[in-house]
Amino acid sequence: MRMRKQKSASHVTLIAQGTEIKGDIEFAGAVQVEGKVKGSLRATNADTASVMIVKGAEVVGDITAPEVMINGQVRGDVYASVRVELAPDARIEGDVRYRMLEMLGGAQINGSLIHEEHQGQLPAPAAKASDEAQKDDSIAE
């Protein structure tokens, strides 16, 4: 298995090596992460969007897209409505929800693998405890 190239080069958002982005990202098309993202990546197009995390890249947050290819580090949950591809240098600390999984030797997951039988809408990531605490604090004020 080799990391597949993004489908449409004209719609690829590149987060280059040496770049760090803080905050959630919603995207259409494809995102290729070579740097670091501290926030979630969420596809707005549930049919054709994809995320590629290359070797040496890091995402601290959830990833939600139809196709997800990982050869770097992810600290968060992965939601893929079509397929997940894990290359030898993939390191995931979180759960992986997938319809189809391709995993090479060397890839590591510290979390659960959860098979989703039917392809469908991308799930909304569950609210984090910190998000709930912020909501509770704002209600109390």
Image: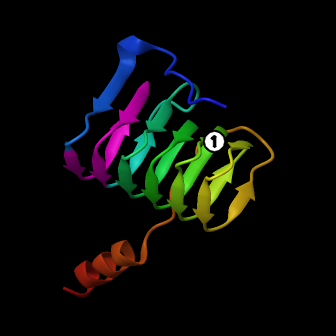
Whether residue 32 appears in magenta in the rendering, the answer is yes
Counting from the top left corner in percent of width and height, residue 105 is at 68, 49
Counting from the top left corner in percent of width and height, residue 75 is at 44, 62
Q: Residues within 10 Å of mark 1 (few under 14, many from 20)?
A: many
Whether residue 53 appears in magenta in the rendering, the answer is no
Q: Residue at x 61, y 62 (%)?
A: 109
- Note whether 54 is above or below 78 in the view shown: above
Q: Residue at x 33, y 38 (%)?
A: 34
- Note whether 38 is above or below 119 in the view shown: below
The quarter of the picture where residue 86 lies is top right
Q: Residue at x 68, y 44 (%)?
A: 104
| Residue nearest the viewer, comparing 89 with 99 | 89
Principal SS element in the magenta part? strand
From which residue to which does the magenta span run?
20-38
| Residue nearest the viewer, comparing 100 with 133 | 100
Q: Residue at x 55, y 24 (%)?
A: 48
Relative horizontal placement of residue 60, taking residue 114 as reference (left or right): left
Q: Quadrant of the N terminus?
A: top right
Relative horizontal placement of residue 21, taking residue 26 as reference (left or right): left
Counting from the top left corner in percent of width and height, residue 102 is at 71, 41
Write down the residue under mark 1: 84
Q: Amino acid at mark 1?
A: Val
Query: Total of numbered circles in the picture?
Result: 1
Counting from the top left corner in percent of width and height, residue 123 is at 58, 50
Residue 2 visible, this angle: yes
Q: Residue furthest bottom?
A: 140
